[in-house]
Amino acid sequence: MLARLGSHHIAAVAHRVVHGGAKYFDPVRVDAAVLADLKAYIPLAPLHQPFALEAIEALLATAPGLPQVACFDTAFHHTLPDVEKMLPLPYGAWERGLRRYGFHGLSYEFMSVALAERYGDAARGRTIVAHLGSGASLCALQGLRSVATTMGFSALDGLMMGTRCGALDPGAVLYLMEIEKLTLEQVGHVLYHESGLLGLSGVSSDPRVLLQQEAGNERVQAALALYVRRIVREIGAMAAVLGGLDMLVFTAGIGEHNAVLRERICRELAFLGVDLQADANATHAPRISSAASRVTVAVEPTNEEWVAAWRTASLIGRPCH
């Protein structure tokens, strides 16, 4: 790959690394010692962490002098208060690093920049960002800083997703293992790959496909209804933590492009003063709330790559445009 660049020069390589654990809160240049630390977090993010680290390790071997910077999806949530980080387990678990970390941090960090540029001080109030893609989470922002989020110790937590279950009674996991005799590996596969929209519908993890088949298919109807319900429930919970809601922002693949699901979610949030402008929603306009809405509802494209590049350039002292 490096040989094909010709006259172009790579100043550094930025990597999105999902988990920085309890040690890494800012981008870091990766060497062998840092890489070893990050490998220890693979069990916390098995879907994503290994592949990023494989790329880093390959470049360390082929271009050891090339700066590589790890930018962490957990870092933006370092501002969470301890009451949001703690798990209700014996205190020793907290001391060993079992806590709610939060994810999609690069996306939320971009939102903190983009919303401030577009809306100014209005974005610094009580804001909830809905990052809805194949993975999905919410983040409550106050002063453009993370104060609550739905993903916790792992990327399984929180909202129902494309193939992941989201928040689940741990008793159901114990039942699968004790009564249905699933192994640890089998349970992990079910929770990460066979649940969510795909598992309930039996059709697809893609809401676009499900909406096309919704009529007459009760399982698809149930899957979409639960997907919306879980988002609405968590937005309500976050609004309670924030003490109200000033702005609701949709981002990522589903959030940016699926007007039907946005409308269904917002319809259930009318009690908070949310009211959509139908034409603006249908065309994915930047602002989709009506003039009568007490809450500004926005659609804002995310750009995790820009955040990683910006952070990397800042770390190595190079300009980023």
Image (spheres, grey):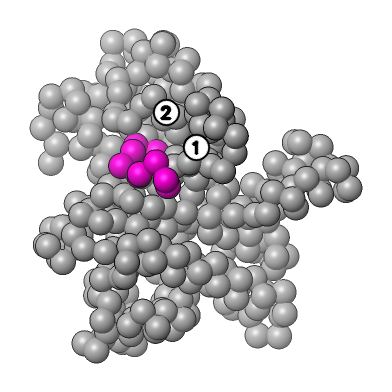
The answer to whether any part of residue 276 appears in the image is no
Can you give x and y, in whole percent of width and height, for residue 149 in the image? 42, 52
> Which amino acid type is shown beneath numbered disc 2?
Ala
Q: Nearer the viewer, residue 167 or 253?
A: 167
Q: Which residues make up the magenta segment?
A: 74-84
Q: Amino acid at mark 1?
A: Arg
Mark carried by residue 22: 2
Q: Which element carries disc 1, helix, strand or loop?
A: loop
- Residue position for label 1: 99
The N terminus - image quarter: top left
Q: What residue is rendered at 37% in x and 34% in y?
A: 72
Residue 218 vertical placement versus 180 (above, below): below
Asked if the magenta segment contains residue 174, the reply would be: no
Judge whether residue 155 can be spotted in this image.
yes
SS label for mark 2: loop
Quarter where residue 214 is shown? bottom right
Asked if 312 appears above or below 33 in the picture, the reply is: below
Q: Is residue 170 left or right of residue 299?
A: right
> Where does the image place residue 120, in percent across and percent down from the top left?
11, 62
Q: Which residue is drawn at the image coordinates 25% and 43% (left, top)?
A: 306
